[in-house]
Amino acid sequence: SNGDVVVLRDGKCFIANERVQTDDIYVDGNDISGLSTSVIKDRKILAENGLVAVIVTIDSRYNKILCRPSIVSRGFVYIKDSQTVLKEAELLVYDSLKKKMQQRTTFGELKNCIRSCLEPFLFQKTNRNPIVIPVILNQKAAIAEIQAKMKANATRTPRITKKTQES
């Protein structure tokens, strides 16, 4: 049965005392490779639970989050009814990343951080397990500095000065 371990040794075949944990396998056409199975599994999850994409812009040079995360969902919840949940989720991701980025981290660690904080939260709030896709955009530090200077200049009061020309 599923999970039984078959041992082939010295021309003999027998079932071992151990078992392996297994899940159902869905076969698409004639291909039963792992890739095909994962694609079908993802499609099943998408159909039943939807998708949540989390877009975060960071500056890896200074290890900073440049703006609040943005969450986009498809097939997960009706947006008009769930604005509060999505806003809470954005704040949760922001706080988790801010804490994680107090130390140097990799993009993989940031993506895992997003998934590990968001998946239980979404399940608790909605009883659904959407596929969570973290998207991390790495903004160059120079562009961030330019934007900060432009923002600072926009808040200053302009000064009027007279220029005199000498003839």
Image (cartoon, rainbow, N blue to C red):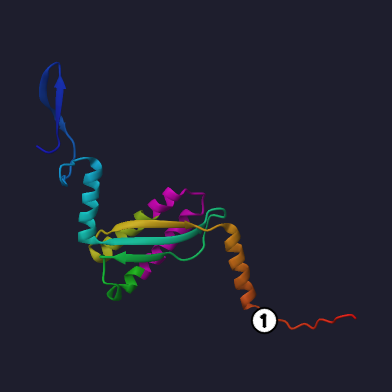
For mark 1, what is the residue? 157
Q: What amino acid is labelled 1 in the image?
A: Thr
Q: In which quarter of the image is residue 117?
A: bottom left
Find out whether residue 166 is within the magenta segment: no
Q: How crowded is mark 1: few (under 14 residues within 10 Å), some or many (20 or more)?
A: few
Q: Which residue is drawn at 26% across and 68% down?
A: 77
Q: Is 76 on the left-hand or right-hand side of 146?
A: left
Q: Position of residue 21 (x, y in %)?
A: 19, 40
Element carrying mark 1 = loop
Using the rendered view, name the quadrant where residue 15 is placed: top left
On the picture, is 76 further left or further right than 95?
left
Tell me where the magenta segment starts and ends, as one range. Answer: 87-113
Asked whether, in this view, residue 107 is left or right of residue 143, the answer is: left
Residue at x 53% of width, y 54% of height: 63
Please state which of residues 47 and 92 is positioned toward the viewer in this rendering: 47
Q: Residue at x 29, y 62 (%)?
A: 122
